[in-house]
Amino acid sequence: MDWSNLFLSSAGRLDRQPFWIGLIVLFIISLVLRLFFVLVFGHHSSVGHVFFLVVELPLLYAWVNIGIKRFHDRDKSGWWVLIVLVPLIGGLWYLI
């Protein structure tokens, strides 16, 4: 599995296994970063929240690329990744 292609490119298709592996890796990285920023800045620190959001932007980019490739594999446009913005139903549609 080519990790740079998985996270940094939106071209191509992605089967289920690499899709779930990519999402789990991104989720674990996000949890570790959240724990780090809570331990360093405290739970209610606005500075910690700002730093966390800045660091999360590359993870968001990788998450969108993985989603686009998975929708390509399902013969749908990459724009379908925006379905997650629909409350409740969008997240379920994305995962199913």
Image: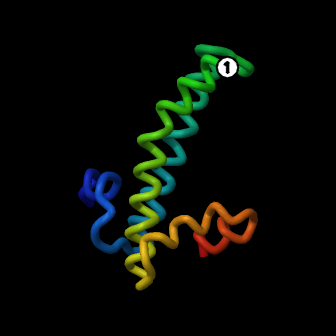
Query: Residue drawn at (59%, 14%), measured in percent from left and top?
Result: 40
Please state if 9 lies on the left or on the right of 80 as rendered.
left
Position of residue 31 relative to residue 61, above or below, is above
The amino acid marked with disc number 1 is: Ser
Neighbour tally class for label 1: few under 14, some 14-19, many 20 plus, Cα within 10 Å: few
The residue to which callout 1 is attached is 46
Front position in the image: 70 or 36: 70
The quarter of the picture where the N terminus appears is bottom left
Please state if 30 lies on the left or on the right of 1 as rendered.
right
The x and y percentages for residue 29 are 49, 40
Query: Residue drawn at (50%, 37%), measured in percent from left and top?
Result: 56
The x and y percentages for residue 94 are 58, 70
Position of residue 61 relative to residue 55, above or below, is below
Position of residue 96 relative to residue 91, above or below, is below
Query: Residue drawn at (72%, 71%), measured in percent from left and top?
Result: 89
The x and y percentages for residue 18 are 39, 65
- Tell me the quarter of the picture where residue 47 sits: top right
Badge 1 marks a residue whose secondary structure is helix
